Amino acid sequence: MRKYVIMGVQGSGKGTQSALLAADLDLVHISVGDIFRWHVKNHTKLGAQVRRLVAAGELVGDDLVEDVVRDRLQLHDWNYGFVIDGFPRNRRQAEFFLESYDIDGVIHLDLPDAEVRRRVLARRLCSRCGMDYNLIAHRPEQEGRCDVCGGELVSRADDTPDALARRLTDYHSKIDPVLELFRRKEYVMTIDARADKATVQRTIRTRFNLPPYLPAQEETVALSEQPGGG
Ligand SMILES: [Zn+2]
C-alpha cells in the first residue's frame, strides 16, 4: 500500500499530478477541495455551512477539514493507498496523521510565488458552462469565447492580484510549518513544479522509486505543446 501527502500552493499542479499518480497506481485521490465543492454543488448540510463561510469572506476552519478527512478515510476504499491533497493544514493535524496512517512520503511541488501569480492570473472560466481555461496552458480557440458552448470567458471573482497575494501569505504562514515538521522527519521530496506536467510526474516517480510514467503517445504530444499547465 502507498500513502502520500501532496503539498503545494494553488497553481502548482497538485490536482493534475495526483490524478496521474492515482490513475496509474490505483491510488485514491482524496482532494479536500473537491470534497467541499461536491457538498456545495449537491446542497448538503455541510455544503450550506461552507457556502455561509465563503459568503462571509471566511476560510473553512481546520476542525471542519479534519472531520471531513477523517470521514473520508474511514470509508476504507483505498486498498492500494491514497494521495491526499489539502490536508494536513497545521502541525497538530500533521502529527496526528503521521501517527495514524504511516505515510510513505510527502510530495512537495515547489513553485515560486511569481510563477503562481503568472499561472493563476491566467485562469479563465466559461460564464455559461463552467469549463476551465488557462491563457498559458489551455487557450480557447477564439479569444474570450468558450470552445464548447461559445459562452464568455471570465476570471474567477477571487483571482485578483490582491486576493491571490492574501492567499499566498495565508498559505505560507500555515503550510510552511507543516512542511518543516515533515522535513524534520525526512518524509519530504521537493519537486520543481515549474517544468511541464509530464516532467514533474517523471521526477515524482523517480524520487519515490515508483514505476516509470509512460503517457500515451497523443498525450505526450499534447503535453509538449502545453508547458506548465494546471
Ligand atoms: Zn462554455
Image (spheres, rainbow, N blue to C red):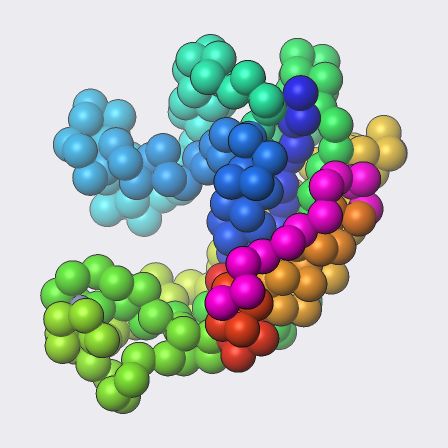
Q: Quadrant of residue 189?
A: top right
Left or right of 60, for residue 1: right
93 and 187: which is toward the camera? 187
Q: In the rendered view, would you say 116 is above or below 103?
A: below
Q: Report x, y in % for residue 160.
A: 39, 71
Figure quadrant of the N terminus: top right
128 and 182: which is toward the camera? 128
**Can residue 208 be seen?**
yes
Q: Residue at image x 23%, y 46%?
A: 55
Q: Residue furthest front?
A: 217
Looking at the rendering, the stretch of residues picked out in magenta corresponds to 207-218
Q: Residue at image x 81%, y 46%?
A: 207
Q: Residue furthest bottom?
A: 143
Left or right of 188, for residue 22: left
214 and 184: which is toward the camera? 214
Q: Report x, y in % for residue 167.
A: 50, 56
**Can residue 229 be seen?**
no
Q: In the rendered view, would you say 129 is above or below 34?
A: below
Q: Predominant secondary structure in magenta? A: loop
Q: Residue at image x 21%, y 75%?
A: 146
Q: How many marks?
A: 0
Q: In the rendered view, would you say 180 is above or below 169?
A: above
Is residue 53 one of those drawn in magenta?
A: no
Q: Residue at image x 25%, y 32%?
A: 39
Q: Report x, y in % for residue 125.
A: 27, 67
87 and 204: which is toward the camera? 204
Q: Report x, y in % for residue 177.
A: 72, 40
Q: Quadrant of residue 43?
A: top left
Q: Ligand 1 is found in which quarter of the picture? A: bottom left
